[in-house]
Image: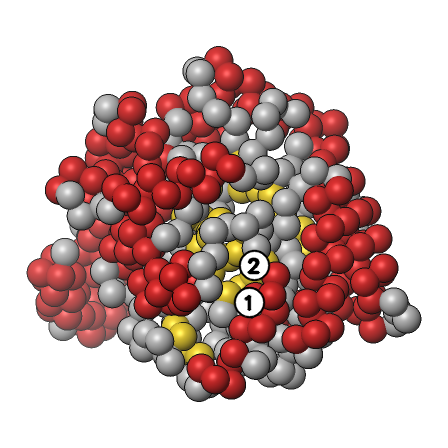
């Protein structure tokens, strides 16, 4: 692909040499100005198509990627035909980016479909053993149902884009249909997860009632435990009625007052419950009790705490450089206190430099295997933050190598929430690792035991 782009640039540069001659000839041909304007517009379109063809992996294009690919393939093909049929000015400047855009887009689509085909023809027993460790979001419900029926995922992440225009009854019916599909194929029930913290992160409001951020509610409360439990009870009641079994809340990162004007998504300071370990621990425990009383499991996030991180890990890699002894008396303390055998904890994609300066916490053996599983003897469930995030994708070996490392280290679920296209390369990497013996079967067996003992998955579809 690099040689293709180099050739494209070379041809475009050569075509530019003819520009001045064509412009000077406009005065001798009354039709030339129109042809020139049309050609310039075609050049701009071709360059726009080329730019898009380089961005199909971008998180910003996920929602309309399917439509966008069809548009780019169609428009670039039409430009190529136009250049072949008419002697337009600047033919090279139109044809070269159009052809390159077509080839790059076709290559992306073919590569994706090829990996998907390989996954779909994999032995069901092998695929299901791996798929139980994935929780996936979706943009195409028909494709999701195929993954559900084949046992290629163990859970579904549902968010705002999936419920637009739906009321509570519609969502409940949709989720029930997924659970029925699992029963039809003799598969265990799905984990149904969402991100309903309240405040900024309220993925299912509407149809659920909007709640202000829990941290803001606690500011005006004389009894934070009581307020947090009531909040969790109200939230859990609404989630349970929909069929949700796992909520990615509460945020137990400490508020260190960090403000990053370029932070579009994390905004931990606006989502944190409090600034002290004691207050966060008390509020989080009470909130989770209220949630569990309604049959919904909570998730402690984002280990080891993003309150000190300036970067937004959705868009950038990041490191926590604070010495470990200081973290143990601050950011790590709520996790250490709350992480019990019946809990779920989400691992952030920031590096905990005191233990591992290279790998994010979500895939670091030093953080997961040594600190959490060995030193802390934690027997609850671990889930990665969304692997669509830059903090995960920019790690050594990308999310493919990171997913293998994560499961080997002791992670139970890999979350692919925003970009469902990443489910296939992740599954492919895990199946290859399983085949060549680099996927730790002992770690997977221990994970299966933890998942079997968990209360997150309903015994019957709701």
* Above or below: residue 1 compared with residue 194: below
Write down the quadrant of residue 435 in the picture: top left
Q: Residue at x 44, y 16 (%)?
A: 186
The location of residue 114, given as percent across then percent down, is: 22, 35
Q: Residue at x 53, y 56 (%)?
A: 345
Residue holding disc 1 = 336
Q: Residue at x 52, y 31 (%)?
A: 190
Q: CA distance from mark 2 to mark 1?
A: 6 Å
Of residue 313 and residue 222, the one placed in the foreground of this image is: 222
Residue holding disc 2 = 339
* Above or below: residue 260 compared with residue 205: below
Q: Where, quadrant-wise, is the N terminus in this rendering?
A: bottom left
Write down the quadrant of residue 157 in the picture: top right
Q: Are marks 2 and 1 in contact (CB under 8 Å)?
A: yes
Q: How is the image coloured?
A: secondary structure
Q: Is residue 119 rendered to the left or right of residue 152? A: left
Report the number of numbered marks. Answer: 2
Q: Is residue 268 rendered to the left or right of residue 220? A: left
Of residue 206 and residue 337, the one placed in the foreground of this image is: 337
* Above or below: residue 357 compared with residue 407: below
Q: Is residue 228 rendered to the left or right of residue 138? A: right
Q: Residue furthest right?
A: 222
The location of residue 442, given as percent across then percent down, is: 28, 44
Q: Is residue 452 visible?
A: yes
Q: Is residue 181 rendered to the left or right of residue 41? A: right
Element type at marker 1?
helix
The location of residue 117, given as percent across then percent down, is: 25, 29
Q: Where, quadrant-wise, is the C terminus in this rendering?
A: top right
Element type at marker 2?
loop
């Amino acid at each position: 692909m690099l040689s293709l782009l180099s050739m494209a640039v070379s041809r475009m540069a050569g075509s530019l040499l003819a520009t001045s001659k064509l412009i000077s000839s406009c005065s001798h041909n009354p039709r030339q100005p129109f042809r020139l304007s049309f050609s310039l517009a075609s050049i701009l379109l071709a360059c726009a198509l080329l730019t898009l063809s380089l961005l199909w992996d971008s998180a910003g294009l996920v929602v309309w990627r399917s439509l966008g690919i069809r548009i780019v393939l169609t428009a670039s093909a039409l430009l190529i035909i136009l250049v072949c049929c008419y002697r337009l000015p600047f033919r090279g400047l139109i044809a070269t980016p159009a052809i390159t855009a077509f080839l790059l887009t076709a290559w992306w689509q073919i590569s994706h479909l090829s990996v998907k085909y390989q996954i779909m023809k994999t032995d069901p027993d092998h695929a299901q053993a791996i798929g139980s460790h994935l929780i996936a979001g979706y943009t195409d419900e028909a494709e999701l149902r195929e993954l559900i029926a084949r046992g290629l995922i163990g859970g579904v992440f549902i968010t705002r884009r999936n419920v637009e225009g739906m009321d509570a009854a519609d969502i409940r019916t949709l989720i029930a249909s997924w659970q029925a599909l699992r029963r039809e194929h003799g598969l265990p029930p799905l984990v149904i997860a969402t991100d309903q913290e309240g405040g900024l992160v309220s993925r299912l409001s509407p149809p659920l009632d909007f709640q202000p951020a829990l941290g803001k509610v606690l500011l005006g409360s004389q009894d934070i435990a009581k307020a947090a439990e009531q909040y969790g009870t109200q939230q859990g009641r609404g989630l349970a009625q929909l069929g949700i079994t796992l909520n990615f809340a509460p945020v137990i990162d400490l508020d260190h007052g960090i403000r990053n004007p370029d932070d579009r998504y994390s905004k931990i300071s606006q989502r944190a419950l409090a600034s002290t370990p004691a207050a966060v621990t008390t509020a989080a425990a009470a909130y989770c009790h209220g949630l569990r009383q309604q049959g919904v499991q909570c998730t402690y996030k984002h280990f080891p705490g993003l309150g000190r991180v300036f970067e937004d890990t959705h868009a950038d890699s990041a490191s926590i450089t604070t010495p470990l002894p200081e973290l143990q008396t601050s950011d790590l303390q709520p996790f250490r206190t709350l992480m019990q055998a019946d809990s779920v904890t989400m691992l952030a994609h920031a590096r905990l430099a005191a233990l591992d300066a290279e790998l994010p916490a979500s895939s670091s053996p030093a953080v997961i295997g040594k600190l959490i599983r060995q030193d802390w003897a934690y027997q609850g469930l671990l889930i990665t933050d969304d692997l669509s995030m830059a903090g995960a994708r920019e790690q050594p070996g990308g999310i493919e190598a990171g997913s293998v490392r994560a499961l080997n280290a002791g992670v139970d679920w890999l979350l692919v929430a925003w970009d469902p296209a990443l489910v296939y390369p992740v599954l492919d990497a895990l199946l290859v690792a399983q085949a060549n013996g680099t996927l730790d079967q002992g770690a997977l067996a221990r994970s299966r035991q933890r998942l079997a003992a968990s209360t997150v998955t309903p015994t019957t579809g709701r």
